[in-house]
Amino acid sequence: MNSIHGLGVIVTGGARGIGRATAERLSAGGARVAIGDLDAELAASVAAEIGRGVVSAHLDVTDAESWRTFLAATSAAGPFDVLVNNAGIMPLGSLLKEPDDVTRTIVDVNLHGVIHGTKAVAPGMIDRGRGHVVNVASAVGRVAMADGATYSASKFAVVGFSEAMRAELAPQGVDVSVVLPTVVQTELSAGVPAARGVKPVTADDVAKVIEEVILKPKAEVWVPRWSQAIVKTTNLLPRRAQEAISRAMKADSVLSSADPAARAAYEERARRH
């Protein structure tokens, strides 16, 4: 594929952060973009601000019926060639102190949202013999960290789901990719430090990679790209050596050392999801 011009694209969680940056970048490239977000008012405001025919509608990714309603409301931007499953939440803290409803919500949004989205949109892609599902996971979907157990588990699951669906959908002309960002400078990562030697990336850095993956499908891409090589190389070492490197880079304490004050506003909103 040489251009995204004319592609119909759904971006979930498109009113903020990576989702908004992706909607902006893809629409600038000529794609027909539909933003789905739980905050319908903010999504409409963002769509109007971006312009270029971007449409939006309320979408609760955890609810299969909401997906059907969303697709009907945004059908003018269809048919949809690409689904960017980006919506996600990241409440942090000790699992033993995590309320049960928060645990369920993290899994519902981060995993079930991806599953519901794929079920809702992929059949149309199969009917047309082409399409692309891009799932935004996280580096902690490959490298687990303390104080983010449920979040990490949900992202590990998204990686596994993506691999399984790639095998299932490839014979029918549909690509599946998973994107794994490190710490991104968005509200979701407020107060979370980067590992030593790893520069935080911006939402547009991730959006750029998503665009590149749509143009040239790849199974798994990290942001920044070089971080994948570090993880793969480190994983070849004995566990003690891996842990020593993690401590040296302060990667083992990235989530547990997050600033609670800086995260307060986000945590409150995420837990109300």
Image (tube, rainbow, N blue to C red):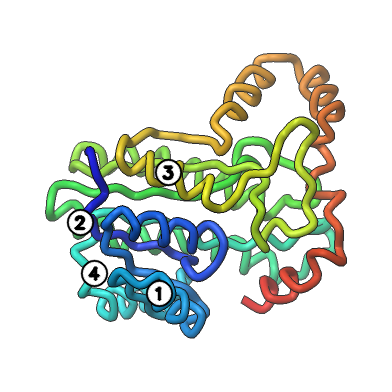
- The residue that label 3 is drawn on is 162
Label whose residue precedes the other's in the sequence (3 or 4) = 4
Q: Quadrant location of the N terminus?
A: top left
- Answer yes or no: is residue 50 visible: yes
Alpha carbon distance from label 3 to label 2: 25 Å
Q: Residues within 10 Å of mark 4 (few under 14, many from 20)?
A: many
Q: Amino acid at mark 2?
A: Gly
Q: Nearer the viewer, mark 3 or mark 2?
A: 2
Label whose residue precedes the other's in the sequence (1 or 4) = 1
Q: Is residue 105 left or right of residue 133?
A: right
- The residue that label 1 is drawn on is 47
Callout 2: SS: loop
- The residue that label 2 is drawn on is 6
Residue in view at x 67 percent, y 63 percent: 187
Callout 1: SS: helix
Q: What mark, if any, has residue 125 been given in the picture?
A: none
Residue in view at x 58 percent, y 48 percent: 155
Find residue 231 and report its image quarter.
top right
Alpha carbon distance from label 3 to label 4: 25 Å
- The residue that label 4 is drawn on is 77
